Amino acid sequence: MARSCRTSPTDRPSDIEHRQTVPGRVPTHHVSLRRDSAVAELLGRDELEVNSFHHQAVAALGRDLRVVGEAPDGVIEAIEATDGQFIVGVQWHAESLVESVEQRTLVSAFIDAAAEGRGRRAVAA
């Protein structure tokens, strides 16, 4: 059963521009990560600056998922599986920020997991 969470930037107006107009290689807002998350472990940090091109965000978590990253306005920016599988979702575009070692590490982890078939499980879209 889905659990209610914070709503989208469209539903939660704030000073943070979640739909930036500057190029994707430019980070525009802060994200705080849970220290005990796989995402924080991959990135080697629990705070970072990200780009942002979304007007919607997670409003309800699916089974076996948890929130691991949020913008200062409470919009969910990162989620991951709680059952040990490599299932990670981020709202920012790490592929546009690969000049950053941390973001390059996140993209590489995704590529490695896909190549190894980790996280394989039927997921309803």
Image (spheres, rainbow, N blue to C red):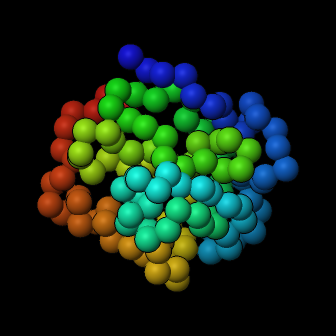
* 112 horizontally vs 103: left or right: left
Q: Quadrant of residue 5?
A: top right
Q: Quick check: 6 above or below 95?
A: above
Residue 118: give x, y in percent of width and height: 18, 53
What residue appears at the point 66 percent right and 35 percent down from the top-left corner?
8
Residue 83: give x, y in percent of width and height: 25, 39
Q: Quick check: 18 above or below 104?
A: above
Q: Quadrant of residue 14?
A: top right
What residue appears at the point 38 percent right and 63 percent down from the top-left corner?
41
Q: Quick check: 120 above or below 125?
A: below
Where is the C terminus found, in terms of image quarters? top left
Q: Is residue 93 visible?
A: no
* 38 horizontally vs 74: left or right: left
Q: Is residue 46 visible?
A: yes
Q: Quick check: 84 above or below 7?
A: below
What residue appears at the point 33 percent right and 41 percent down from the top-left corner?
81
Where is the N terminus found, in terms of image quarters? top left
* 112 horizontally vs 89: left or right: left
Work out which residue is located at the far left of the displayed protein and give it: 116
Residue 110: give x, y in percent of width and height: 32, 62
What residue appears at the point 68 percent right and 73 percent down from the top-left corner?
26
Residue 44: give x, y in percent of width and height: 43, 71
